[in-house]
Image (spheres, rainbow, N blue to C red):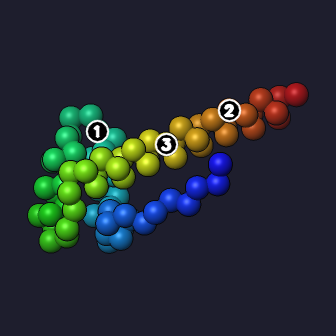
Amino acid sequence: MNRQRKCSNIDRLPPQIRDTAEEMMRDPTNTYKDIAEYIKSKGFKTSVSGVARHAANLNETAATLKWRRKISVSLWKK
């Protein structure tokens, strides 16, 4: 499975705003609407569905990295 990740509007944000938005995504008290409003307040276009897709991609990437780390640690223990 060799999928290329598409570059989203959030990926194109300045690093400081993108990092803050991604930090907000990790905080369960923030909704996607809150995050979209934050990005819009900084003068950039986005949508709630765009934020949700970006969050899903982040979660998928994190799960993949966690799985790969688990495999590599188990291989090193052998």
Q: Which residue is disc 2 drawn over?
A: 70
Question: Mark 1: which amino acid?
Answer: Asp
Decide: few, some or many residues near mark 2? Use Cα within 10 Å; few <14, some 14-19, many ≥20.
few
CA distance separating discs 3 and 2: 15 Å
Which one is in front, 58 or 78?
58
CA distance separating discs 1 and 3: 17 Å
Residue 16 point in image, percent of width and height: 31, 65
Looking at the image, residue 77 sits to the left or right of residue 54; the answer is right
- Which comes before the other along the chain, label 3 or label 2? 3
Residue 20 point in image, percent of width and height: 29, 56
Question: Mark 3: which amino acid?
Answer: Glu
Label 3 or label 2, whichever lies nearer to me, is: 3
Question: Mark 2: which amino acid?
Answer: Lys
Looking at the image, residue 49 sits to the left or right of residue 43; the answer is right
Label 2 secondary element: helix
- Which comes before the other along the chain, label 1 or label 3? 1
Say which residue appears at 32% left-offset and 62% top-offset. Answer: 10
Say which residue appears at 19% left-offset and 68% top-offset. Answer: 45
Q: Is residue 10 above or below residue 26?
A: below
Q: Quadrant of residue 7?
A: bottom left
Q: Which residue is disc 1 drawn over?
A: 27
Label 1 secondary element: loop
Which mark is drawn over residue 60? Answer: 3
Decide: few, some or many residues near mark 3? Use Cα within 10 Å; few <14, some 14-19, many ≥20.
few
